[in-house]
Image (cartoon, rainbow, N blue to C red):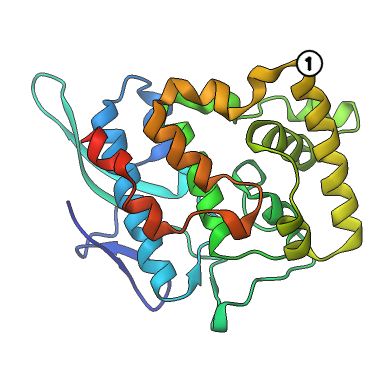
Amino acid sequence: MASTIVGKSGRVYVQGEPYFRSTLLALLQEDPEFPPAERIKILRRTGEGIQELHSKNWIHIDVKPDNILVNWTCDKDGNKTVTDVALGDFDIAFKSEGGESRQTPYAIGNAMWRSPEGQTGRGVTKASDIFSFGLVCIYALGGGEMLLINNYQELVKHGISPEQEILTRHFSYFGPVSDGLLKQVNNEKWCVALRGASRIAEEAVKEQPELRFERWGEELGPEAQNMISGMTNPDPTARITIDQVLTHRWWQEST
């Protein structure tokens, strides 16, 4: 497996090879039966790419399946093996000097994969990448139907923005809004919106307790569920770091 190198231009190279034949998103869409062991290999290398960025105080901000680049081979028996993986698209990456968060007047990155604070554009940190990576792990391990929204037009027709729907879903899956999240966002208008989405989520969970990740995440296995729960904590100050992700016992169990 090749290592990831981030050039000064922000372009990603893998052992000098800038071309990739697919992305994680396209790969799993085209082959829903793609081998579990190879999916885990992709996640591991993606995590290592994030670790490299975070060690240099960069925040990617747009971690999502279509920004994970993949090369793979297929033998004569149809067995597929991942050969190269890299995290791509650094157009909105941010150098966090002194560990400060990124504040923007509007949300950036893909709405589907943003952290709760990412939906506000305020208080984005390395922990925001971790939340997004947690969602990617769920997607790669087979839980994509709980994450993807395909009825954007229907939502708009009912006056619901995709961001509002995603926030409500995430609070229902991973737990209610926290003081840590509100303090990090530090904007009254957004705090009201976050509390509102959390209230709606809690009402939904009362009627459907199975919405909680602690219920449906059991299908991913206990160790994967434990790791991802730490990554998707609504409180960014309580999420595990990328170093903790990569030293989690799930990786040893799954290889």
Residue 61 appears anywhere in the view: no
Is the C terminus in the top left, top right, bottom left or bottom right quadrant? top left
Instruction: Indicate left or right for 223 with 149 as reference.
Output: left
The percent position of residue 89, horizontal first and vertical second, equals 47, 59
Residue at far bottom of view? 98
Q: Secondary structure at mark 1?
A: helix
Residue at 63% in and 41% down: 112
Q: Is residue 102 left or right of residue 157?
A: left
Which quarter of the picture shows residue 78? top left
Q: Is residue 86 left or right of residue 118?
A: left
For residue 63, side relative to residue 245 (left or right): right
Residue 146 position within the rendered picture, expressed as x and y whole percent measured from the top left:
59, 25
How busy is the neighbourhood of tag 1: few (under 14 within 10 Å), some, or many (20 plus)? few
150 lies above or below 64: above
Residue under the point 76% across and 35% down:
168
* In the foreground, 230 or 25: 230
* Rendering coords of residue 121 (x, y %): 73, 61
Image point (29%, 60%), residue name: 18
Q: What amino acid does circle 1 point to?
A: Glu
Residue 196 vertical position relative to residue 126 in the rendered view, above or below: above
Which residue extends farthest left?
76
Q: Percent position (x, y) of residue 190?
A: 85, 56
Residue 13 higher or lower than 72, as above or below:
below
Q: Residue at x 23, y 40 (%)?
A: 252
Count of residue discs: 1
Q: For mark 1, what is the residue?
A: 207
Position of 57 relative to 148 (above/below): below
Identify the image quadrant of residue 109. Answer: bottom right
Residue 223, visible in the rendered structure: yes
Q: Nearer the viewer, residue 246 or 65?
A: 246
